[in-house]
Image (tube, rainbow, N blue to C red):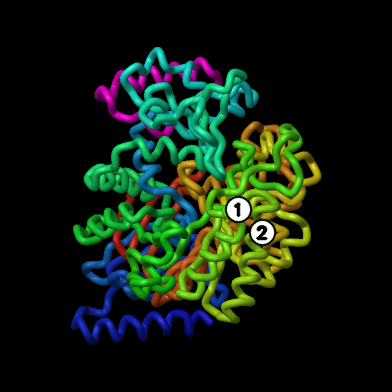
Amino acid sequence: MRRVFILAGLLLFAAASLSSQQSPSADLVVLRGRVWTVDTTHPQAEALAIHGSRIIAVGSDAEITKWIGPGTKQIDAQGKSVLPGFIDAHVHFTSGGGEISGVHLRDAATPQEFARRIAEHAKKLPKGEWMLGGTWDHELWGGTPLPSHDWVDAVTPDTPVFLTRYDGHMAMANAVALRLAGITRDTKDPPGGTIVRDQDGNPTGLMKDAAMDLVYRAMPPTSEEKLLRMARAGMNEARRFGVTSIHDISSTEDVRAYQVLAARGELTLRIYCITPLPQWEAPATAGLRAGFGNDWIHLGALKGFADGSLGSTTALFEQPFTDAPQTSGLPNAMMLPEGNMLKMALGADRAGLQIAIHAIGDKANRIMLDVYSEVAKQNGPRDDRRWRIEHAQHLRPEDFARFAQLGVIASVQPYHAIDDGRWAEKRIGHERCKTTYAFRTLLDHGVRLAFGSDWTVAPLNPLLGLYAAVTRATLDGKNPGGWFPEQKLTLKEAIEAYTLGSAYAEFGEKTKGSLTPGKLADVVILDTDLFSIAPEKIKDASVRYTVVGGKIVYDAGKN
């Protein structure tokens, strides 16, 4: 089998050499590593060789040494893990880049600390500039009280403030932002959203889901130059964490910015742009189909929303929340009026576009499986759909088989399990949590997993995602043996979900996702051998080198 594996590389390299008249040597070799290829025909090796942007051989040190020539750059992996570059199947990339330089509230553990950080950051901003980001978590101070604009109005008299909860489904506006958005006690809740009010009916500043759009509409548009800065900041983060491809929840402005960076030769990761489902007619009219583009940027996927989030009590469940029995969540505005989601899905699917729908609660997931089933019935069978449900967090036991039957990809984020696991049982009870973040059950039913981070909702670092998937040890330290440990994955399964699984979810498994001759040379080299350490140590590992298209884009010794 090894001879076949090397031969494939030889044939590829021979063709390249004949056309370019170059000497028969690699541009880059990685030696003395623990190479986990995620290729079932040749899962382990010691070394690999790269020519141009492609892998040309994978094998033993002795075999790969033969590819070394006078100009070959060499990396000594020192017995550490060598893996395919991580492919993050769900990020909000420019937002993440923007929040790097914004106010940091993710670990603000008290209301007082929350307000203090906002006051300090306001001093750095020009008068009138919006303060955004934040990613606060009210569960850090026990879940109550919820933030209110009167916590910060006195320290932000000239600064519009709109700071999101870390899940992105609830945000707090200060008095300035409420005024600019025209939100008063007389403003009605929009479909699919809630304006949180005090006992007198006045807005507290908290907006849930569709209500957040009332404030977003009041904001000035982000300039292209600012978007480019945000994208560059995001790429800096991605390089140091070994992320070589992303599936980005993109606006049309983001897509334009990525094209500018590509034209300037600045991209250091590959981007699958997932644009808004309500805009499906634009790519359909242009004749785009799923996977259109090149190795750096491609399009054709559409993101929709079925519901909100668990933390904001806007995830849509069949039964009420345990700790908020007055509600069972909210359907997203895209679900309204009834039948709207199906109408958009039918049109997008008929045009050959990929559909990826955010669904958190068990009812939202059930409805989306119903929608996909009806789309298949009306539009007929097809082999290239690759429908996705983003998050797929809380499922009814009977719906695992439906995922598999319909061929729906579960695009999931393992870090959420160890984060939300701190308080999820309080919100929905022990029984419903048995089928929550149920990666093992999904995999055992034959469902394809694509791993991601949901950055900036969770950290971008894939090693934390691997740690979460194999340990399920919640962040509060209360479940060292794993929160619902029966849902753990093996390390090999988790790595595959973060590489080849995510490649499949973007129609890219033939060009990336494994260390296979002929595929793109996207490689990550770690500072430890993941297979030789205890699972709880995975979170402490770090990246030594990130290689994208045969080029070293991150070197821990230099960066």
Residue 189 vertical position relative to residue 555 in the rendered view, above or below: above
Residue 59 seen in this snapshot: no
x, y (%) of residue 282? Answer: 37, 65
Q: Say few, some or many: other residues with alpha carbon within 10 Å of mark 2 (under 14 / 14 to 19 / 20 or more).
A: some
x, y (%) of residue 329? Answer: 66, 42
* Front label number (2 vs 1): 2
Quarter holding the C terminus is top left
Magenta span includes 128: yes
* Residue that numbered label 1 is attached to: 359
**Type of residue at label 2?**
Ile
> Does residue 218 appear to the left or right of 107 in the view shown?
left
Magenta extent: 107-134
Residue at image coords 53%, 34%? 188
Secondary element at image label 2: helix
Residue 537 vertical position relative to residue 268 in the rendered view, above or below: above
**Type of residue at label 1?**
Ala
* Residue that numbered label 2 is attached to: 367
Residue at image coords 51%, 42%? 210
Disc 2 to disc 1, C-alpha distance: 9 Å
Residue, far top: 154
Residue at image coords 59%, 57%? 494
- Which mark is first along the chain, 1 or 2? 1
Q: Determine contact: label 2, label 1, CB under 8 Å.
A: yes
Residue 119 seen in this snapshot: yes
Secondary element at image label 1: strand
x, y (%) of residue 85? Answer: 43, 59
Seen from the viewer's position, the closer of residues 185 and 7 is 185
Q: Say few, some or many: other residues with alpha carbon within 10 Å of mark 1 (under 14 / 14 to 19 / 20 or more).
A: many
Q: Residue 70 has which mark?
A: none
x, y (%) of residue 509? Answer: 48, 72
Magenta span includes 356: no
